[in-house]
Amino acid sequence: MKLNQKLAVTTAGVALGLTAMKANPASAAVITVDFTITDVTQNAAYGGPPLTIEQPLSGFYSFDDASTPVIVPPASLNLSLFPLTDFNFNFLGRQFSLADISGYGGTATDLLISGSQTESDSLTRFSIFAIPRPGFAEPRFDATAIRGPFVYSITGKPQLSQRTTTPVPEPTTISGWLLAGLFSIALKKKAAFKKQ
């Protein structure tokens, strides 16, 4: 059997084997999720003037689904979230980014974070708890804003919406296909050299 024939049979065998196993090449994706905060209400302590809040509030976060998830304690909750790779939220004139937040992270359907910024005589702090599963509290947004002597309590309802994502092949998958191609070329050159 000639080398080209052996290569064709091997390639066909691998293709049929992968099809039979229903194997897909490994892939990862950076997933971006948009969130909105609706039904926003505020209460001012000490008689402060109402804050201007554009509704609905909105932002987004991203995570890599190939990263190691964080298990939220206690383990009996059976809740794992991915560390965020990007975050953007404009709230009360402040732009919150990844550097301003803490917490466990998120998935396409869950988000558990908090954030804060301090500027001279003002503080803006918020938390988003969005775990829409049985046995968990209702998703909620809670915030505190301190503006001079006035303290504001702000609440709302978070909603998450995953953007369409395109899977990106894992580097090892790409490397494997590259090595297979180089091996095939090397075999062809070796066969051509033997013919001479």
Image (cartoon, helix red, strand yellow):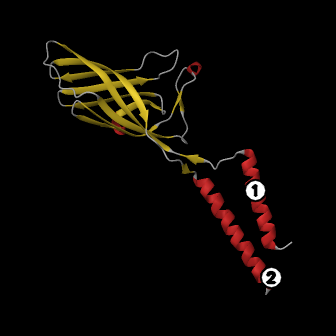
Discs 1, 2 touching: Cβ within 8 Å: no
Position of residue 87 measured from the top left corner of the image (x, y, whole percent)? 37, 38
User: Residue shown at 15%/12% (left/top)?
Assistant: 46
Residue labelled with disc 1: 14
User: Please, what secondary structure does the residue beneath circle 1 have?
Assistant: helix
In the rendered structure, the answer to whether residue 81 lies left or right of residue 142 reads right
Q: Callout 1 environment at 10 Å: few (<14), some (14 to 19), or many (20+)?
A: few
Identify the residue at image location x=74%, y=72%: 187
Residue 124, quarter of picture: top left
Residue lying at the far right of the rendered structure: 1
Picture disc at residue 194? 2
Position above or below: 188 against 51: below
In the rendered image of this protein, does residue 61 appear above or below residue 124?
below
State which quarter of the image contains the N terminus. bottom right
Q: Where is residue 111 in the image (x, y as percent from the top left)?
A: 44, 28
Residue at 76% from the left image edge and 59% from the top image edge: 12
> Is 151 left or right of 187, judged from the image as shown?
left
Residue 179 % position (x, y): 66, 63
Rendered image: mark on residue 5: none
Front residue of 132/86: it is: 132
Position of the C terminus, as image quadrant, is bottom right
Residue 173 is situated, as x and y percent measured from the top left of the image, at 62, 54
| Closest to the observer, 130 or 101 | 130
Q: Quadrant of residue 74?
A: top right
Numbered disc in front, either 1 or 2:
1
Q: Earlier in the sequence, mark 1 or mark 2?
A: 1
Q: Element type at marker 2? A: helix
